[in-house]
Image: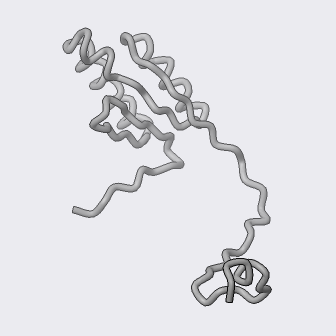
Amino acid sequence: MGLFDVFKSKKPAEDAVEFPEDTEPRERLSVRIENVTGLGDVERIGGYLKQGNVVLVKVRDLQKKDVGLFQTSLQKMKRLSTQFNWDMVALQEGYVIMTPSFARIERPEA
């Protein structure tokens, strides 16, 4: 049996898994990438979340430039997340992911 005989075979392999095709049309979900440079940017990001977008926020530059403003901005993002039931998670690479209330971030079990 040669290498190309595997591709010519019409019967599925034993370890192949077939998933049913999703026939229902889905609403598009937008993911925005934003940079935070001050408190005004937090309000803009909140507007995107209210529109139903998932936002990937780059906070590393602000953290390196002004730690106090970074902490204030992060606290404001946390307050908005709690107020509107959004989900928020910080990544080690200097990013924060924020999702609207209909989406949740899966966290690994400890």
Q: Quadrant of residue 87?
A: top left
From this viewpoint, which residue is outermost toward the front? 2
**Residue 38 position in % (x across, y down):** 37, 10
At a point 20% along the width and 14% down the height, the residue shown is 67
- In this orientation, which residue lies closer to the viewer: 65 or 42? 65
Q: Is residue 53 left or right of residue 1?
A: left
Q: In which quarter of the image is residue 18?
A: bottom right
At a point 23% along the width and 20% down the height, the residue shown is 71
Name the quadrant of the N terminus.
Answer: bottom right
**Residue 46 position in % (x across, y down):** 48, 25
At a point 37% along the width and 33% down the height, the residue shown is 96
Q: Quadrant of residue 4?
A: bottom right
At a point 70% along the width and 82% down the height, the residue shown is 6
**Residue 23 position in % (x across, y down):** 79, 65
**Residue 16 position in % (x across, y down):** 62, 81
Q: In this view, does 67 lie to the left or right of 3?
A: left
- In this orientation, which residue lies closer to the viewer: 108 or 13? 13
The colour scheme used to paint the residues is one colour
The number of numbered badges drawn on the structure is 0
Name the quadrant of the C terminus.
Answer: bottom left
Residue 25 higher or lower than 42, as above or below: below
- In this orientation, which residue lies closer to the viewer: 97 or 77? 97
